[in-house]
Amino acid sequence: MQFDDKVPIYIQIKNVLYQEMITGQLAPGAKLPAVRQLAVDLTVNVNTVQRALGEMMTAGIVTSQRGKGNFVTLEASRITQLKEQLVMTQVEQAYEQLHALNLTDEEIMASLKQYIAQRGQQDD
Amino acid sequence: MQFDDKVPIYIQIKNVLYQEMITGQLAPGAKLPAVRQLAVDLTVNVNTVQRALGEMMTAGIVTSQRGKGNFVTLEASRITQLKEQLVMTQVEQAYEQLHALNLTDEEIMASLKQYIAQRGQQDD
DNA sequence: TCTAGTGTCTTATTTTACTATTACACTATA
DNA sequence: TATAGTGTAATAGTAAAATAAGACACTAGA
């Protein structure tokens, strides 16, 4: 996998795994790939994977069982909350950025609308 | 000024200055504050300011005159282009992120709409 | 009981961002 | 011609992120 070198890799790993949980590729209770396997898949060091997982554990999204593996929390509501939080953060960040570039609310809406329209003409 | 410690300071400095150019606080041809002054204002090292300015020069947005100062380009079209590029990048990034979180186009539009509505109830 | 698969931890090294400090080069002006 | 204000550059040091390699602890199954 390719990373944006402007943001720490462990953050990006966290985001990827969060996305997989939210889209259901990793359902509640599911076993994550082994840390060593994740490290290979992501072409990254085990310690870096561990760091990402550590933050996900602190957040209560992942639980760890020594000798068995790492698992997505069984509490589906946590995943729902996570999604809401990530969506909110992203919307807020984008809005404030565009607002700082002097775009009005209407212009911001229009920009998004236009992007979607353009994008719709192509593949997914 | 306070920085987000998850993204390099020189990047954030670049963004701040770009915003000021786009909003007109720094008009085409305007003289930027002296590098040492910027360093004080931003509570940051001169070298870090220099690094940000270096990238802006490479991008053709800022020109430097030794002994005189750093200046915003006189070509207003470059600023226009810069704005368009920054807006596009931000919209794209936000959309793709939300899309990756399984939101439909309609849900993405609705999220933004709702955020703006909520935000409108408060101050700027 | 042994072994493979798993998470966890430690130690050392490299790279990058940032800071600190100093020196140099150029410009304008008193 | 001094001097103050400016950009530029070099050197050194610190901290954080990431890598590399290995050791340890636990679990499940042959």
Image: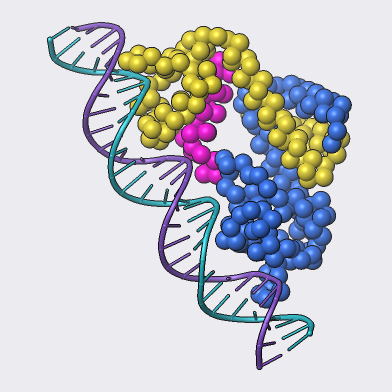
Chain colours: A blue, B yellow, C purple, D cyan
Viewer-closest of B50 and A109: B50
A73 is higher (above) or lower (below) than A112: below
Q: For the point 85% across and 39% down, which residue is it?
A: B104
Quadrant of the drawing holding the C terminus of chain B: top right
Residue B41 visible (yes or no): no
Residue B108, horizontal then vertical, whole percent:
81, 36
B58 is higher (above) or lower (below) than C14: above
> Is residue B101 magenta-colored?
no
| Left or right placement of residue B52 versus residue B36 in this view | right
Q: Quadrant of residue B89?
A: top right
| Left or right placement of residue B29 versus residue A56 in this view | left
Which span of residues is magenta-colored?
B1-25
Q: Quadrant of residue B35?
A: top left
Viewer-closest of B89 and B39: B89
Q: For the point 50% across and 22% down, which residue is it?
A: B58
Residue B47 visible (yes or no): yes
Q: For the point 82% across and 42% down, which residue is it?
A: B103
